[in-house]
Amino acid sequence: MLMKIVLSVALCVFVSASEPECSRFHYEEKTLEKIIETEIYVDKIKSETDIMQQRMSDKLEGIQEDWEKTKNELNDANEDSKKVLEEIKDKVESLSTVQAVAFLAYNIKNTAPSDGGTIVFSTTHFDVGSSYNNETGIFVAPVAGIYMFTLHLCLTGNRFVYLEIDTTKGPILKGRFIDDGSEYHSCQTATTVAELGIKEHVWIKSGLSTSGPDLWKHSYIWNSFSGALISAVAK
């Protein structure tokens, strides 16, 4: 009996030594290692996923910011386009409503104008566009465009006067009318063209002259100031 027990123990020791993988503890250790490796792998995937989600979130926020900026720029551009269209519409309407601009005024109020004073022509022969004021002597351009102006003045004998056709932006003609004879009066004419903006003013400004009544006024002659729109210009 004792011999059988010894043989059985020896057999178990031999089997255990020859097949260690059959040990329950060895299996549990391997299983634990796999679980730990799996958890590490899962944590790695989760970390990479979080990083990827953060990057995607940042990109989406950037896209959203770019879209908001683009939307605001589109709105601003739309408003600017509306303003430009309104301005073009107003200009087209102003050009279409004013078919012609022209005036002729004569009969000077003062034959001895002061230096720097405005020469006023008090009688309006015609005024298409209602642009010339025969009380102030000022023409106001109803539309932007190219205009022609003509000044015709008669001087008493042996006198002179410096003159300008002046505008809001400055003179468009400078000159001197002179009568160098002692027996007869003379009449002289000056013509110029100018580009005017809408509502720009034009008038005749007197400069240095001889003393007394330099300009000659008579029933059978006209001292006159005239102007006409040659071509409208859209601005």
Image (cartoon, rainbow, N blue to C red):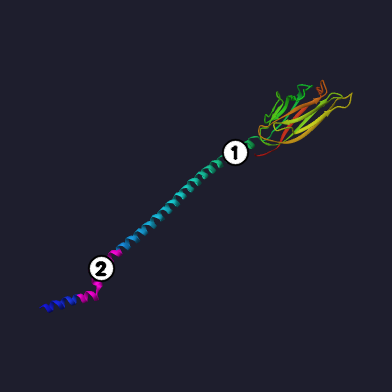
Label 2 to label 1: alpha-carbon separation: 89 Å
Residue at the extreme left of the image, as rendered = 1
Q: Nearer the viewer, residue 159 or 224?
A: 159
Camera-near label (2 vs 1) is: 2
Quick one: quadrant of the N terminus? bottom left
Residue depicted at 25% across the width and 73% down the height: 20
Q: Nearer the viewer, residue 219 or 59?
A: 59
| Residue 87: mark in rendering | 1
Q: Which residues are magenta?
A: 13-34
In this rendering, does residue 6 appear at all? yes
Please tell me how crowded label 2 is: few (under 14), some (14-19), or many (20+) other residues with Cα within 10 Å.
few
Residue depicted at 79% across the width and 32% down the height: 190
In the rendered structure, the answer to whether residue 88 lies left or right of residue 163 reads left
The question of residue 68 being in magenta is answered with no
Residue matched to label 2 = 27
* Image coords of residue 227 (percent x, y): 73, 32
Circle nearer the N terminus (2, 1): 2
